[in-house]
Amino acid sequence: MAQKNFKELFDPKQTKWSGLSVQMFLALLAIVVVVVYVPFGGKEAAFMRGNFLTVFTLLAVFGILLGEIGDRIPVWNDYIGGGTVLVFFTSAVMGTYNLIPAKVLKSIDVFYGEQPVNFLELFIPALIVGSVLTVNRKTLLQSIAGYIPLILIGVLGASVGGILVGFLFGKEPLDILMNYVLPIMGGGTGAGAIPMSEMWAQKTGGNPKDWFAFAISILTIANVIAIFTGALLKEIGKKHPTLTGFGTLILDDSKEAVKEEAGPKVEVGQKEFAAALVFTGVLFMFSHLSGVIWSSLNLPFEMHRLAFLVIYSIILNVLDVVPASLKAGAKNVQTFFSKYTIWILMGAVGFGTDVREIINSLSIANVAIATAIVVGAVLFIMLTAKKMKFYPVEAAITAGLCMANRGGSGDIAVLGAADRMELISFAQISSRVGGAMMLILGSMIFGFFA
C-alpha cells in the first residue's frame, strides 16, 4: 500500500479527501464554514440546524480536513495516532477556548450522547457486534483455551506494574485500575475507552467526557510507548534468537491455536447491511433489557448493557446460529462505522472535552505509570510464555503490546515497528476479544467501586 503524502491531497485529478477531489472538498468546507460562523439577522450560527444530518455533515467535513492531514504528518502519524488524534485534540482546543459558537457546541453535545439522537449508542454496538460476532468461530474457541489466558497474564502484569509505580506517586491501587489500566488495556478508543466512559458515567452520574478526556491522554501516551517497545522487542529477538519465532507465535506449529478459515464467500450488499443494522439494534435492545433486569435484582455489582452485548455476541458466535450472510453484513456495518465515522465521533468527543485537563495529565507521574503498565504486561508475558508454548517475543507483542495500544491502528503500528505483521490475526484477537473482556471487567469494577 502506497504511503500517503501531501502532494496527492492537492492534485485536482485525485480524490484523496475521503473520496472527494480537493476542489469539491473545499467547496463543501466553505459552505460548512458559512453555516457555522456567519451571523444573520443578529443571531450567531443563524443558518445552523441542530438535526442529525447537519451535525453529522459538519463533523464529517471537519474530520476529513484534519484527519487526512494528520494521517500524512511524519512521526505524528506513525507514533502519536495520526488523523484520529489530530481531530480529537484540535476539536478539544476549539471547544475549550470557544472557537466555535455555543449553539453549534450544544447541537454537537446532543448528537454525541444525549437522547433522542445519541450517535454513540449507534457507533458502539455496531463495533462490538461486528467485531466479536465475526471473529472466526474456531479461532474464538481455540483462543479462549490457549491465547486468552496469555492476555489475562498480561493484564495482571500491567496492573501490578501500574500499582507499584503508582505507589511512588501516591496513587491508590483502585485509581490505577480504573483510570490507567482499563483505558490502556481496553482495546483502543472506539470499542474500548468510549464505551468504558459510558459505563463510568452510568455508575457515577458524571459526564462520560470527563473520564474519557483523561483516558485518551493516558492511552495516547501508552500507544507511543507500545510502538517503541515493539521496536525494542524486535532487537531483543535478534540478539537472543531463542526468545523469538521470528514471526511465529506458537512454539509447536502442530498446536497452533489460530488458523483462519476462508469459509464460503458471501456477497454483501445493501440488504445484508440493513439486516445486520436491524439485528444489531435488536441485540442492543435485549442487552439493555438485561441490564435493567440485572439492576433490579440488587446484585453486588452492576453489569452495563454493553457488557451484556459483548457476552451475547460471544455466545451467538460460539453457538454458530447466525447465518453467514448476516455475519458478513455485521462486519460490513462495523467496517463502515470504524473506518468512515471515527473522525466524526472523535470530533464530537473533542468539542466537549476541556483540553486543559489533558495538558495537566501529561505529568511525569502519568508517563511513568503508563510506561510501567506497558512494561509490566510485557514482562509477565515473557516470563510465562514458554511454559504456555508461545515464543516470548511474539507473545509479548501480540498479547501485551496489542492490548496496550490504540486498537486496530495501534496494532498495525506496533506490528510494523516490531516487523511482525504476520501476527495480525492474534493482534486482532487481543484488540477485539481481549478488548471485549476488558469491557466486562470494566463494568464489574465500575459497578463495585466507582
Image (cartoon, rainbow, N blue to C red):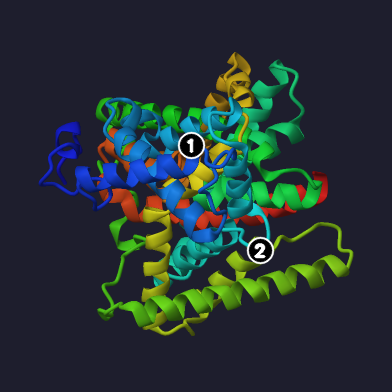
Q: Amino acid at mark 1?
A: Tyr
| Residue placed furthest toward the right | 298
Residue found 58% across the figure and 25% down from its top? 97
Between 50 and 182, the one lying in front of the other is 50
- Residue 381: x and y, percent? 49, 40
- Residue 121: x and y, percent? 59, 61
Residue found 41% across the figure and 67% down from its top? 333
Asked if residue 29 can be seen in this view, the reply is yes
Residue 74: mark in rendering: none
From this view, report whether residue 347 is shown above or below residue 324.
Answer: above
- Residue 164: x and y, percent? 67, 24
On the picture, is 341 further left or further right than 108?
A: left
From this view, report whether residue 309 is shown above or below residue 49.
Answer: below
**10 Å crowding of disc 1: few (<14), some (14-19), many (20+):** some
Distance between the alpha carbons at the discs numbered 2 and 1:
26 Å
| Residue placed furthest toward the left | 13
Asked if residue 184 can be seen in this view, the reply is no
Residue corresponding to mark 2:
116
**10 Å crowding of disc 2: few (<14), some (14-19), many (20+):** few
Quadrant of the image occupied by residue 274: bottom left
Between 25 and 78, the one lying in front of the other is 25
From this view, report whether residue 117 is shown above or below residue 68.
Answer: below
- Residue 260: x and y, percent? 31, 66
Q: Secondary structure at mark 2?
A: loop
Viewport quadrant of the C terminus = top right
Q: Amino acid at mark 2?
A: Pro
Residue found 46% across the figure and 61% down from its top? 143
Residue corresponding to mark 1:
37
| Residue placed furthest toward the front | 41
Quadrant of the image occupied by residue 84: top left
Between 278 and 385, the one lying in front of the other is 278
